[in-house]
Amino acid sequence: MMNVTNDLRIRRYILAGIMLAVSLGMVYAGTSGSVSVSVPLPSTFVIKVGGPNIYQAFITGGNGLPIFVESNFSRLMNNDILASSACASGCSATLDPGKYNQTQKIQVNVPFTLAGPTAAIIFPQNTFTTPAFNVSGNSFRFDGPRIDDAARKFQAVITCTNLAGTGCHIPIVIWGALCLIRASQFFNITTVGIFLTRFSSGCEVLSNTITGDLNQFNNSSLSTMQGVEASGMSQRIHDNTISYIRGGAGIRVGGGTINNAIHNSAAGNTLFHNEYGVQTVSAIDVRIVDNTIYNSTSHGIIVSTALVPSTFGPLVIGHNSIGESGQGLCCGSVPGLESHIDLAGSRCCWYSVSITGNVMLDRQANQTTKTDIEIASQNYRNLTIVGNSIGKARTTPTILLSVTPFDRTWIIADNPGFNPQPVRGPLTAGATPFTYTNLDGYKEQIELITIGDMTAFTCRGIANIIQVDAISPILNTLDTCVFTYVAVAPTYDVLPT
């Protein structure tokens, strides 16, 4: 049954086998039986007769004869509801439990609510490749029904990064503002489950279940997928469960062009068996917080840069629980090569990046996580990695700097399981004057073990006492100590703090 409201109410009686008898006064003969209706009708009735995908409608005050005879759910939605005068300023519809076969794109260009239980299942058919719901209107709400895209999963797929969204097999594409997609289920996703385009804003995607095709998870012929693609402005992707997204992320915030995601957040989601848990590219003011991420094929969280250099950030990655990354279950990934959090990207630059309060652990006997945090790019400014609980990983160190810190704004400190590092030394100073530079990202001090015939010991531009066991001031990233001596080189320890 589908109820439509806005000065106009539609009630549909689903008839199976024989028609249900409704004592309303007049008999209408359908192909599978008959139903009694009153004249004039107290409200609009939509009656399903003659098969699994035939819809008929009556209108209030009519003569009892059908004014619509539709062949599919799409035409009923597009022509009879969304294009009706009653829906000119917006309307709502409720689906009762049942199967709704969709053979064409549903174009929504007015405020519209579609609600119903998860037992109301919409099946997009393989007769079209465009989005199931292409939403250009504002205030779209999808609350409760299920979309099962199984019929389209074996079709050839065109890339989903094109703006028109054609050929994408996406259940819902949003171009407008202030949408709410809540408590719904999206099964057998083959490209993107929900696509918030860079023209959309103010949307909330809350408490949904989004799942790829479990049987096709390792199928290398399938396209890259995303559970939710969150471009646009002020989008909230919260409390969803997203799994089995191959070749892409459970949630992707921004991507492709410059700064096409602004003030967006991914929070409180449960993300497992995806290529990446969360991915962000070319975004401004992004929060990735309080998510539970595990069994990722590749990285738990990956940050990268856009195709064109620009200024990205700030970025907060905080209080996530991440486990068992680098599974290598699909998409050409080899187990054991990826990290829980990876900072990558070959173009400039992310500013004000904070990675704090995360908990990371690989509990497997044969661990697949390469390391907990890997910094593989210098294109990060004001980078703070503090207060994370670092667990066991396949290799050490658990925070891996694959590059030299770009500047003094990199701070890595107070990460249990990583900080403090073991003392290094005794080390022997090189040719005089020898300069030691802190390239590790975390704070250090220098302790003199032997002084030889030193004539000067200068750290951070400040002269220090020359004596055995003398300790330098704390050295932040790229701070230096200069050892000057005549002939006998001093020795020293490096004391990470």
Image (tube, grey):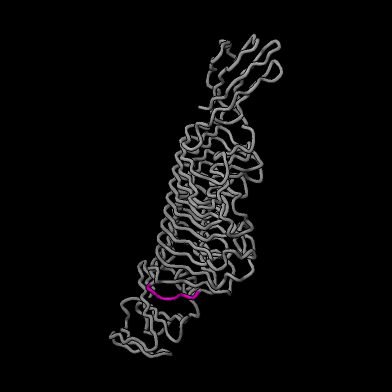
User: Residue 191's quadrant in the figure?
Assistant: bottom right
Could you tell me residue 195's position as x and y percent?
53, 57
Could you tell me residue 473's position as x and y percent?
53, 18
Front residue of 158/433: it is: 433
Question: Is residue 252 visible in this depiction of the protein?
Answer: no
- Majority secondary structure of magenta residues: strand
| Residue drawn at point x = 44 percent, y = 52 percent | 269
Question: Is residue 472 visible in this depiction of the protein?
Answer: yes
Front residue of 410/434: it is: 434
77 falls in the magenta region: no
User: Residue 426's quadrant in the figure?
Assistant: top right
Q: In which quarter of the image is the N terminus?
A: bottom left
In the displayed structure, would residue 243 be above or below residue 20?
above
Front residue of 178/131: it is: 131
What is the magenta range? Answer: 96-101
In the displayed structure, would residue 334 be above or below residue 84?
above
**Is residue 217 toward the left or the right of residue 58 in the image?**
right
In the displayed structure, would residue 399 be above or below residue 66?
above
Could you tell me residue 179's position as x and y percent?
45, 56
In the displayed structure, would residue 452 be above or below residue 188?
above
98 falls in the magenta region: yes
